[in-house]
Image (cartoon, grey):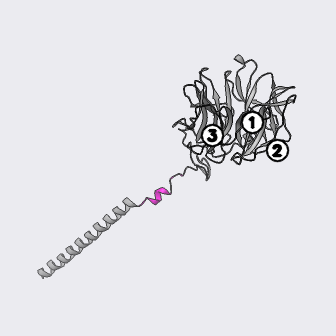
């Protein structure tokens, strides 16, 4: 009888040990599982940044990416469409010290003249960023002995330096994505083209042609840049890729071809020339072929083409600085086929120029 009790107790003890082992293994398995799987119930209660109701207080809209505010970001994710038809230009302001230049904007119909800068020194060479939300421009503030490239909001607020070098940096033109800038750098009358990242880093020299290179304009659709150079004694139009390769002379005239401007689709280039003895506008295909004259000014004309050239973003207009007998210094516009040439804006005896759409 005693032996039976001992055997029974031994069986119970063995069963308890087996159960304990099973429970230990199960607990170990559960513990490992808890370490590798998320706590689903807790995740269900975490806020997703949408606020009290779906879609509210989201910091990044659907379809957009969050930009790095520490760098120079020319694109807000949207086009500032209210600025697409606004023409930028620089003009002297009566009452400013030495009648220095300020940046202005104007609608393509000649209305809405707005003074953008108010620094009372020299501001010029304005150009829109590709999204038309900001303006890149040239200023001698705060150093009157040096011209630097800045960026500001479309209303003139928050000016920030982009490119500051010894000497003068002028004529900025942006790549299609706004990530790089080509510009003319001048030191001791030597003018060459340089490219720099939009945040001012990694500046590299693009041209080294011993003579003056100026008037750069970056293609709106590619890595090609047109510019004017007088390496053959007279200014002509050249094309080069942004990596410095593919240099090509597009015009060969002894009378001075300058101020090239791309068409919005990148297929044509407009430029100014004195081929007839007077300044006129010409258009050619991007390879330099099919040159045609679209304005025909001469002695005694009421309008004379003077300087600078820009093609509107919708391809409908070319704007240029012009001199008029009746109104003095002006901004004139004309259709690419030469029709409907007229004065858009006039400043009288004060200088105006550098139109840029």
Q: Which mark is residue 178?
A: none
Q: Say whether disc 1 or disc 3 marks the residue closer to the N-terminus.
A: 3
Does residue 76 show up magenta in the picture? no
Contact, CB < 8 Å: mark 1 with mark 2? no
Which residue bears the numbered disc 2?
A: 337
Q: Position of residue 335 (x, y in %)?
A: 81, 42
Which residue bears the numbered disc 3?
A: 174
SS class of the residue under badge 2?
A: loop
Q: Residue drawn at (55%, 49%), measured in percent from left and top?
A: 49
SS class of the residue under badge 3?
A: strand
Which residue bears the numbered disc 1?
A: 272
Q: Which residues are magenta?
A: 37-48
Front one among 178 and 274: 274
Front one among 299 and 31: 299
SS class of the residue under badge 1?
A: strand
Q: Residue drawn at (66%, 44%), measured in percent from left and top?
A: 219
Q: Residue drawn at (70%, 45%), measured in percent from left and top?
A: 288
Side (left or right) of 253 relative to 54: right
Mainly helix, strand or loop, the magenta region? loop
Mark closer to the observer (1, 2): 1
Mark closer to the observer (1, 3): 1
Q: Say whether disc 1 or disc 2 marks the residue closer to the N-terminus.
A: 1
Q: Is residue 227 above or below residue 90?
A: below
Q: Position of residue 324 (x, y in %)?
A: 84, 28
Contact, CB < 8 Å: mark 2 with mark 3? no
In space, the residues marked 1 and 3 are separated at their CA atoms by 21 Å
């Amino acid at each position: 009888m005693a032996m039976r009790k001992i055997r029974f107790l031994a069986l119970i003890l063995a069963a308890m040990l087996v159960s304990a082992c099973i429970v230990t293994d199960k607990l170990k398995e559960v513990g490992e599982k808890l370490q590798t799987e998320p706590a689903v119930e807790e995740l269900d209660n975490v806020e997703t940044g949408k606020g009290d109701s779906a879609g509210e207080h989201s910091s990044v809209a659907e379809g957009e990416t969050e930009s790095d505010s520490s760098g120079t970001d020319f694109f807000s994710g949207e086009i500032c469409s209210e600025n697409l038809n606004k023409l930028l230009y620089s003009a002297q302001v009566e009452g400013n010290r030495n009648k220095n230049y300020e940046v202005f904007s104007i609608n393509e119909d000649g209305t809405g003249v707005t003074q953008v800068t108010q620094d009372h020194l020299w501001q010029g060479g304005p150009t829109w960023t590709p999204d038309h939300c900001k303006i890149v421009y040239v200023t001698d503030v705060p150093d009157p002995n040096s011209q630097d490239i800045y960026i500001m909001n479309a209303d003139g607020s928050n000016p920030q330096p982009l490119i500051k070098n010894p000497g003068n940096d002028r004529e900025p033109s942006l790549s299609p994505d706004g990530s790089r800038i080509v510009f003319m750098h001048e030191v001791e009358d030597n003018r060459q083209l340089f490219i720099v990242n939009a945040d001012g880093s990694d500046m590299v020299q693009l041209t080294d042609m011993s003579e003056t290179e100026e008037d750069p304009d970056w293609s709106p659709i590619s890595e090609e840049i047109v510019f004017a150079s007088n390496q053959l004694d007279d200014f002509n139009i050249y094309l080069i890729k942004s990596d410095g390769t593919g240099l090509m002379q597009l015009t060969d005239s002894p009378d001075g071809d300058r101020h090239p401007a791309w068409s919005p689709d990148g297929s044509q280039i407009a430029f100014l020339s004195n081929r007839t003895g007077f300044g006129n506008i010409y258009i050619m295909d991007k390879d330099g072929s099919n040159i045609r004259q679209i304005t025909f000014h001469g002695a005694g004309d009421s309008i004379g083409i003077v300087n600078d050239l820009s093609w509107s973003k919708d391809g409908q207009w070319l704007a240029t600085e012009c001199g008029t007998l009746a109104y003095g210094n002006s901004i004139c516009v004309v259709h690419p086929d030469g029709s409907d040439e007229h004065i858009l804006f006039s400043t009288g005896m004060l200088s105006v120029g550098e139109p840029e759409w």
